[in-house]
Every structure is written in C-alpha cells, then in structure tokens.
Image (cartoon, rainbow, N blue to C red):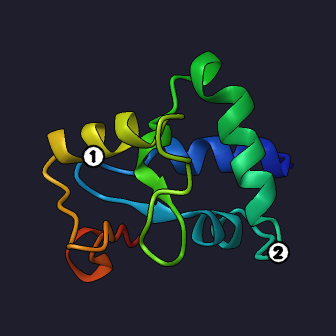
C-alpha cells in the first residue's frame, strides 16, 4: 500500500496545466481529508525533488497561501502563464479553473 505522501505526490503530479486544486481537496483524494497541512508540508519539502507543479495548489478560498514577496508573485505568475486568471480580490474561480479528478 502506498503511503499518504506517495499518494499525495502522484495526485499533485496529475493536476493539469491551467487548473488548480486545494490542499484539502488533495488530502481528501489521498485518503485523509484532515491532512491539508500535511499536503502543504509535502509541497514545501518535496516539490523540487519530485518536480511537482506546486503552483497549482491554492487554498480553499481560491487564494494563494504564500505571503507576498515570499513566493506569492512567482506562484501567481506561473498560474497566469498557464491561463489561470484572478479576480479583483486575487481569487481564482474554481468553476473555471478548479481541477476535478
């Protein structure tokens, strides 16, 4: 049986360009809906080693969780380059850009 970490990595790798998923959505798909923070830790510690599309994971409010001047601008730019747009409050519309596995 795969571990939560392995399953989470595989789920994140499958988020297509131009789509976003939430930390909680990934945790639910990985089998533990209460592990959204663990998903964030996996992204933080394993994105480079596993070539994860980390920028496609946002919070449940449709916003980027990283602070401005500490990854926020990079994540927003990467998403915009894939065609994801943000509203005036820097939120992503899940109906347009949400990934449904």
Foreground residue among 94 and 73: 73
Single out the residue that lies furthest toward the bottom.
95
* Residue at (49% x, 54% y) in the render: 57
Q: Quadrant of residue 5?
A: top right
Q: Which residue is rendered at x = 44% and y = 37% of the image? A: 53
Q: Quadrant of residue 62?
A: bottom left
The residue indicated by pointer 2 is 34
Q: Nearer the viewer, residue 36 or 32?
A: 36
Element on which disc 1 rests:
helix
Disc 1 crowd rating (10 Å Cα; few below 14, some 14-19, many 20+) is many
Percent coordinates x, y for residue 34 in the rendering: 82, 75
Using a 10 Å C-alpha cutoff, classify the residue at mark 2 as few (fewer than 14 neighbours), some (14 to 19) or many (20 or more). few
Residue pictured at 44% horizontal, 47% vertical: 14
Q: Which mark is residue 79?
A: 1
Horizontal relation, residue 53 to residue 48: left or right: left
The quarter of the displayed image where residue 48 is located: top right
Does 4 sit left or right of 58 as displayed? right
């Amino acid at each position: 049986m795969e571990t939560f970490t392995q399953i989470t990595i595989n789920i994140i790798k499958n988020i297509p360009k131009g789509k976003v998923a939430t930390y909680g959505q990934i945790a639910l798909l990985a089998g533990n809906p209460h592990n959204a923070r663990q998903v964030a830790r996996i992204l933080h510690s394993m994105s480079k080693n596993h070539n994860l599309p980390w920028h496609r994971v946002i919070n449940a409010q449709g916003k980027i969780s990283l602070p401005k001047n500490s990854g926020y601008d990079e994540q927003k730019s990467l998403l915009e380059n894939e065609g994801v747009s943000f509203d005036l409050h820097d939120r992503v519309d899940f109906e347009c850009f949400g990934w449904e596995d």
